[in-house]
Amino acid sequence: MTYKVTSSFLKLKTYCEVEKLKGWDPYDGLNSKVFQALPLKHWDLARLAWIQGFKRSPINFRTLLLVPKEHNAKGVALFLLGYCRLYRLAEHGIEDFGTKAELLEQIKEVSKLLLSLRSKGYSGSAWGYNFDWQARRLFLFPKHTPTVVATCFCVEALLEAFEITKDETLLKETLSAANFVTNDLSRTPHGDGIIFSYSVKDGNNTVINASLLGAKILSYSYKYTKNKAHADLAKKAVVAACDLQEADGSWIYGLLPVQSWKDSFHTGFNLDAIATYQLCTNDKSFQSCIDKGVAYYIKHFFEPNGMPKYYNHKTYPIDIHCPAQVIVTLSKLEKFDENKELIDQVLDWTITNMQHKKGYFYYQLKKGISSKISYMRWSNAFMFNAMAHYLWRTKLEDHGV
């Protein structure tokens, strides 16, 4: 299995590096130069329809409608996380994916790129997406509007890079993201805790995984600065999230009536964030929440043959985020070895069914016509990071490290 994953990963790595980590995204339709030249761009319903048309179409119209390939901050962060895992392999003499010197240079370059993609004008470092995004008819996120989700992925990646490069400037710029969370995000009280908003724009204020990613950023801040106020605030977000966890270990996505679904990869985000809080603060009081969540995650989101499910009650669409996130989550929770059989089955199924011969991974498989478009952030960056985690775990073990 390690050989199959290595071969698959090298194809993916080559593809992404040839593309210079740039690409399209499921939600980048409003970047179309054609659409931007039309008066329809001022109509919320037209923007929403245009985005959904691009997202749902199995045919890629982006070249025809002049949507450029661009860097996406979250995607770049995922690549950086993957390169950091490959560097850790090279540290132990496993140079299947580059020498230690080559990977160090790659990490420095990608870190510099990621810092250059920051959104300007906020209380601390913050990141958004490289496209306008119409979320239902309620609100429009202009491009580069920072979100706590994008920011958290960038923070984690840059802190991993700091641990390798020891660049103090990198550390200082990254940790300032805690100020973005504390000063720029709104808070919704829930029980004895709080829920951080998804972004600086009002309207999407009670998404559970987004709130936990805010807690994750503050937890990292506490790890490096020992700012107790940040740890205390992070705990309030974890308290609210654990209170919202159902008895069987599951979470709905958010508290709006249209956010009551339960899905695989956001469950993974939740577990990762709570575990990160515990690791950074040494507060283990939420372990039962993690244990229940992991049990539900493994039981409800994967078929016996390794096929990943998007939702708890149905399989389709099969989204590439789902197999990618389970590898990262179980690795982060130190539950990789005990679930190695499941991880192998999921990864084997995914490579067999969702990777193109050119190396990139498909976006979604559906019962009918599937979307096999190459999306750099959503598909390739997530799998790059996931497979790097897998190879880091398995190759170190194979070498007796």
Image (cartoon, rainbow, N blue to C red):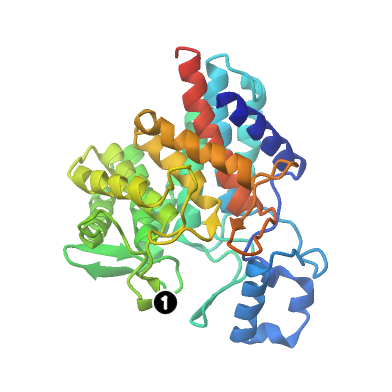
Q: Position of residue 306 (x, y in %)?
A: 48, 42
Q: Residue at x 48, y 54 (%)?
A: 151
Dot 1, crowdedness within 10 Å: few (<14), some or many (≥20)?
some
Q: Secondary structure at mark 1?
A: loop
Disc 1: which residue: 203
Looking at numbered disc 1 in the image, what kind of residue is underneath it? Gly
Work out whether 210 lies above or below 277. Answer: below
Quarter of the figure with the N terminus? top right
Residue 54 falls left or right of residue 291: right
Q: Residue at x 25, y 53 (%)?
A: 249
Numbered disc total: 1
Work out whether 232 lies above or below 397. Answer: below
Quarter of the figure with the C terminus? top left
Q: Position of residue 59 (x, y in %)?
A: 74, 65
Residue 54 falls left or right of residue 233: right
Q: Position of residue 316 (x, y in %)?
A: 51, 60
Residue 26 falls left or right of residue 69: left
Work out whether 14 lies above or below 318. Answer: above
The residue furthest right is 64
Work out whether 158 lies above or below 58. Answer: above
Q: Residue at x 80, y 70 (%)?
A: 65
Q: Position of residue 232 (x, y in %)?
A: 23, 51
Residue 167 visible (yes or no)? no
Q: 162 and 261: which one is in front? A: 261
Corner quadrant of residue 40: bottom right
Q: Residue at x 67, y 25 (%)?
A: 102
Residue 396 visible (yes or no)? yes
